[in-house]
Image (tube, helix red, strand yellow):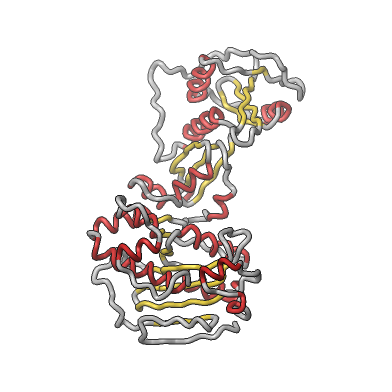
């Protein structure tokens, strides 16, 4: 790395604007919280970038204030974005093209930066911005970055709901923070650290801890579950299942936006103790796109009946419920659904009160049925389909003698 470094052992603040990188280690002389809300390592992070798009723009500066058992340390580095810095960004941050010329590229600082951030609570203002840029940059060099994240904008809103403004400038004014600079990475990271310290004198500790827990987003997931894996989940309708240790089924759910629902379960803000307990147990997740809401209802009920997951309520069975029922059609039937967003077609196959699945065309639906194995009577399918047939669900007979399904409605 061709960056210049500086060590300051006892200074409370040190930033070297002419250097490409600076590292500041503080002694225990810096004021510490007598009873911190969290007893975990924390990094307060800020970035400067060439713009707001993680796909088009790049990082120009990283600033980190690290707080842990060993004390407080500050580290920053200019980064060569390998693209021009727009003039308005140069005016805002004071970081010019000349300043980043010869600075390390992100791939040069990535291993050391990841080691500094890894395993610590990531705290930032508008944290999705900073996390998104770092995650994208780390991904480009082949490294995974999925820390637990606390956004101080969200935390400020939760703690001070009567206030309208929660930007960093508003926090400086409201809480008498002392900026050494603005729109420079290390200076802004230090303001977030100052805000964190102020909260410990303004808010009762139990309230602060509760709001921190609620607003922390858990991205470090157990088992084989990663952010990249969740990105492959269906954006539209479908069902999903969570599994715990030894592949024990925990929970089955359905959603019109499966990917979003999975994020809310596993990486979203914790809204109940049930959410917390479930997320802590999950080790594996699987899903299935269903092409529509009715298909999701049928698939969800089928999975619950088959897997018997511990966090789902088992459907009640009464003496009046049938253990079998006559099939009102001459053979298998299909009904069509369309995804609202994509308008993709899904043809769902049902035979003798057993949900077979769905396919994107009638011909493929016939192939799906032909390759299926006959199963037992499904009370859940009976209940759901009877209800929808009574409300006018239109079904078609599925031809089983050829790949051309019958077109007549039944």
Q: Position of residue 374 (x, y in %)?
A: 61, 26
Task: Identify the residue at horizontal 49%, vertical 18% (top origin).
Answer: 387
Q: Quadrant of the N terminus?
A: bottom right
Side (left or right) of 288 relative to 188 = right
| Residue 245 seen in the current view | no
Q: Position of residue 367 (x, y in %)?
A: 71, 29
Side (left or right) of 239 relative to 175 = right
Count of marks placed on residues:
0
Say which quarter of the image contains residue 56. bottom right
Say which quarter of the image contains residue 24. bottom left
Q: Position of residue 278 (x, y in %)?
A: 40, 47
Say which quarter of the image contains residue 87. bottom right
Q: Position of residue 347 (x, y in %)?
A: 65, 27
Q: Nearer the viewer, residue 243 or 219?
A: 219
Q: Quadrant of the C terminus?
A: top right
Task: Identify the residue at horizontal 30%, vertical 50% (top origin).
Answer: 162
Q: Nearer the viewer, residue 250 or 257?
A: 257
| Residue 31 seen in the current view | yes
Task: Identify the residue at horizontal 24%, vertical 57% (top origin).
Answer: 206
Q: Is residue 235 above or below residue 76?
A: above
Q: Is residue 58 above or below residue 371?
A: below
Task: Identify the residue at horizontal 52%, vertical 36% (top origin).
Answer: 256
């Amino acid at each position: 790395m061709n960056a210049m470094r500086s060590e300051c052992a006892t200074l409370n603040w040190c930033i070297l604007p002419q250097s490409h990188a600076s590292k500041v280690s503080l002694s225990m002389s810096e004021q510490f919280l007598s009873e911190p809300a969290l007893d975990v390592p924390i990094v307060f992070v800020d970035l400067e970038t060439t713009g707001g798009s993680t796909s088009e723009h790049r990082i120009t500066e990283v600033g980190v204030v690290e707080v842990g058992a060993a004390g407080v340390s500050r580290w920053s580095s200019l980064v060569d974005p390998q693209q021009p810095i727009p003039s308005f960004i140069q005016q805002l941050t004071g970081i010019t093209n000349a300043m980043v010329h010869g600075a390390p590229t992100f791939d040069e600082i990535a291993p050391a930066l990841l080691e500094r951030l890894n395993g610590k609570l990531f705290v930032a203002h508008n944290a999705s911005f900073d996390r998104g840029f770092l995650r994208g940059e780390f991904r480009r060099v082949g490294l995974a970055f999925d820390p637990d994240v606390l956004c101080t904008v969200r935390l400020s809103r939760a703690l001070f709901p009567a206030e309208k403004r929660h930007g960093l400038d508003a926090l400086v004014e409201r809480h008498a923070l002392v900026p050494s600079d603005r729109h420079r990475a290390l200076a802004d990271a230090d303001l977030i650290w100052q805000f964190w310290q102020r909260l410990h004198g303004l808010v009762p500790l139990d309230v602060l801890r509760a709001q921190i827990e609620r607003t922390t987003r858990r991205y470090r997931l157990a088992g084989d579950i990663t952010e990249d894996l969740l990105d492959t989940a269906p954006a539209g309708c479908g069902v999903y299942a969570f599994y715990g240790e030894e592949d024990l089924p925990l929970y089955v759910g359905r959603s019109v936006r499966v990917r979003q629902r999975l994020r809310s379960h596993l990486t979203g803000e914790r809204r109940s103790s049930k959410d917390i307990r479930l997320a802590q147990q999950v080790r594996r997740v699987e899903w299935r796109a269903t092409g529509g809401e009715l298909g999701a209802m049928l698939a969800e009920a089928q999975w619950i009946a088959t897997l018997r997951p511990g966090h789902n309520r088992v459907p009640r069975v009464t003496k009046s419920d049938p253990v079998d029922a006559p099939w009102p059609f001459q053979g298998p039937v299909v009904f069509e659904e369309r995804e609202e967003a994509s308008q993709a077609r899904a043809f769902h196959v049902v035979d003798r009160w057993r949900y077979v699945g769905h396919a994107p065309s009638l011909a493929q639906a016939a192939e799906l049925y032909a390759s299926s194995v006959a199963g037992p009577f499904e009370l859940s399918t009976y209940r759901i389909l009877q209800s929808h047939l009574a409300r006018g669900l239109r079904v078609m007979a599925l031809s089983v003698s050829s790949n051309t399904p019958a077109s007549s409605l039944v």
